[in-house]
Image (spheres, rainbow, N blue to C red):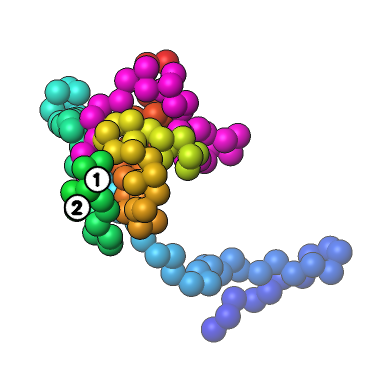
Amino acid sequence: MDAPVKTREGFQREEQPQPRKPAREAAPPPEPVAAPEPAADAEQAPAYVETWPIKVKLLHRKILGNKNETLDELSFREPTGGDVNRVGNPVRINSDGDVIIDEIKMTRMMGALSGILTPLLDRLDPRDWNSCAYRLRRFFLPDPEAW
């Protein structure tokens, strides 16, 4: 039976405390995920090394070369500071941090690096042109490690 309820002054009842029932059972906390360990030495993580000349296959349309030969790939030599002085930097970063390719400068740079006249490069399929431009663009961006 229930325990008697006592009435106290001020019309308040003193009741026996009852154990609380949880509204719903809490899920167990998720297991912590271990973060990947950084390489102990920079030598352990092999850095990507570009080999020159860079060759880009023309997958969509072959073009004629300077001597009327059919080209199915373009070969680019390593760019130099002199190339940037002559042609201009074909890549820039805008205020939002987006990488922007200047198409005219990039076409001229592709001509300088491949030895193919720019009017011949104008006949590239746009997808092949973009393949070449995006393959070369990283060589015209600053390297944050130097800062």
Picture coordinates of residue 47 (x, y %)? 19, 30
Residue 9 occupies which quadrant of the picture?
Answer: bottom right
Residue 75 occupies which quadrant of the picture?
Answer: top left
Height in image: 23 above or below 97? below
Type of amino acid at the residue the image marks with label 2: Thr
Residue 55 colored in magenta in the image: no
Task: Work out how far the residue at label 1 is from the one at label 2, CA to CA, in angstroms.
Answer: 6 Å
Query: Is disc 1 placed on a helix, strand or loop?
Result: loop
* Side of 1 relative to 40 (left or right): right
Camera-side residue of 74 and 100: 74
Type of amino acid at the residue the image marks with label 1: Gly
Residue 79 colored in magenta in the image: yes
* Side of 100 relative to 147 (left or right): right
Residue 145 showing in the rendered view: no
Query: Is disc 2 placed on a helix, strand or loop?
Result: strand
Height in image: 85 above or below 51? above
Camera-side residue of 111 and 40: 111
Q: Quadrant of the C terminus?
A: top left
Please state the extent of the stretch shown in magenta in the rendering: 73-101
Q: Which residue is mark 1?
A: 65
Q: Quadrant of the N terminus?
A: bottom right
Camera-side residue of 86 and 25: 86
Residue 83 occupies which quadrant of the picture?
Answer: top left
Camera-side residue of 127 and 65: 65
Height in image: 115 above or below 17? above
Q: Which residue is mark 2?
A: 70
What residue is at 13 percent from the left and 28 percent from the top? 44
State which tag comes first along the sequence, 1 or 2.
1
What residue is at 34 percent from the left and 53 percent from the top? 124
Is there a contact, CB below 8 Å, between mark 1 and mark 2?
yes
What residue is at 30 percent from the left and 25 percent from the top? 79
